[in-house]
Amino acid sequence: MLTELKTPFEQGNGNQTTTWEQCIAFYTDLAQRFPHVLQFNQIAVSDAGVPLHAGVISADGEFDREKLKRDGRPVFFNNNGIHPGEPEGVDACMALVRDFCIEPSRLAALGRTVFLFAPIYNVDGSVNRANTSRVNQEGPEEFGFRGNSRHLDLNRDFIKCDSLNAKAFNQLFTAWDPDVMVDTHTSNGADYPYTMTLIHTQADKLGGELGAFLRSSMLPQIYQQMEARGWPTCPYVNPIKESPDQGIADFLEVPRFSTGFAALHHTIGFMPETHMLKPFADRYASMRALVDVTLAFTVEHGTQIQTLRHADRQQSMRKTQWPVSWKMDEARPSKLRFKGYAAKHSKSLLGDYMRLSYDKNEPWDKEIDYYNNFIEDVVVPAPQAYVVPQQWREVIERLQWNGVHMERLATARMASVQYYRIQSVISRGNAYEGHMFHDDVQVEKKNAIVELRAGDFLVPLKQENARYAIETLEPQAHDSFFRWGFFNSVLEKKEAYSDYVFEDLAMELLRTEAGLQQQFDAWKVAHPDLLSNQAAVLDFIFAHCQRHIEPEWRRYPVWSLV
């Protein structure tokens, strides 16, 4: 092999990863040398103005996306460098793409499958190099930073899209509609012998025939093939208590994460997590094996996966009930054969507490509880369509980026709709990825006749992208636009009162408004501790009286047509 075709990792000492500059130059050179194998282009720029690239490989040199889609070609998507301090996937992808270019047999083995890849997704973090931010990680010698230039974790940004990267990703993903995605990572947490662990789209949440296929066919073969290649792999080690011997659970990868986002598009997603305490060279080799194995399975079963995706999409168009939130089925654990190290507790030398450590001199191999069954937590009836008023531009843009079919109303009309009144919201006390995320949302369904204005957007649910629309527009969904704060302004009352004036008016309202006195009496029984608080007393009456009602206050501003 020519020296210039070796990756920086291959030319190094086994503990070095490529820089962004080296990586892009490497792919640019390959694309120029092998134009009938690789197409490599800039697709956007990051928030810091760093170019963002994507590449495509096809065995027959066909790169026209629309033609590839018309021909029904399976698409495998490999995303790398979302956390640039976890870079083994970046280096492994470089070697894999190079091998497609120089090894005809490997390229031919792709068959009809298209290999789509993002060489480094978080380019801002990649150019912010050091060797200090990964606190517990063994190598490489220098690496990028987890946050982007806006200090965002891009693996929490797929729904809210605060970054230009996420906007580009949403559009790229929608345009190519991959059948399988592998997004490469490094894990932290418990200590155990495995170099490779695997997060997959949670099968129950993925649902349908595709979820059953993932659980019964795809995962067992991936684990079997990884074992055969010398890299025994287990599910991501997510202990339900403190250490793996007490049981582990599937990671519920909601849509803020890459695999959860992929599920909204009926795509099977994997997030391989190599173990931080293993040498970088081993993490690299196991990651290359994992991508190879998953790609080989996709090549072999691509048509079947596409058929199952199509069936699930068709089924979703006929659904009358939609689960929008899931929870672990604690009563129904499976069993998993697991290799671990003894968890030990000893007195800390730093403070007055007991600390956890793992003793590699005491390995164990036994069955543990594996909580891989999840059940529906919140289920909503599916409307015929949603109406998103045109003023909620940020929401409309994100629906468009994800290929959601919408019809713009040409004329105004009155319509009978259902809507949600927000009863209560519990938000995080501190910022979470730039937002005050709403962890708990309670709603009450209401009926009304409202005016739909010319220019508002109708979102019918008899469409293939119904799942994305439902899981972002239903406020109680795991990662709805409401939870991320896109509609926070409706939680604010716009008018106020002067207490010395409203005190007398409140007495009149209690006498004259039907039902208000009964509501107030019930509130007093429930909150005797607040009766000495004038603001609390008057606020309740002000909020519940009809004379000074603000209809927009706490009214979720997306209508459902039923």
Image (cartoon, grey):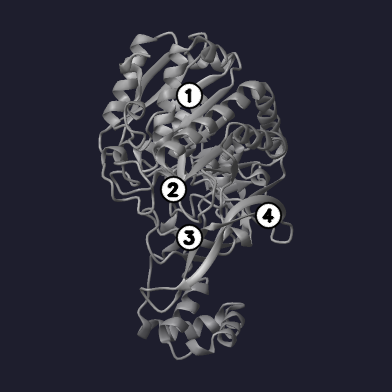
Which residue is more in the foreground, 331 or 366?
Answer: 366
Contact between labelled residues 1 and 2, with CB atoms less than 8 Å apart: no
Residue 107 coordinates in the image, percent (x, y): 52, 13
**Marks 1 and 3: which is nearer the front?**
1
Under circle 1, the secondary element is strand
Residue 486 coordinates in the image, percent (x, y): 43, 51
Q: CA distance from mark 2 to mark 3?
A: 32 Å
Which quadrant would residue 39 be assigned to in this image? top left
Residue drawn at point x = 37 percent, y = 72 percent: 496
Instruction: Report crowding for label 1: few under 14, some 14 to 19, many 20 or more residues within 10 A (C-alpha).
Output: many
Which residue is more in the foreground, 318 or 195?
Answer: 195
Rendered image: mark on residue 116: 1
Which quadrant would the N terminus be assigned to in this image? top left
Rendered image: mark on residue 438: 3
Amino acid type of disc 4?
A: Lys
Q: Is residue 40 left or right of residue 327?
A: left
Q: CA distance from mark 1 to mark 3?
A: 35 Å
Amino acid type of disc 3?
A: His
Residue, disc 4 = 366
Q: Is residue 444 left or right of residue 335?
A: left
Residue 366 coordinates in the image, percent (x, y): 68, 54
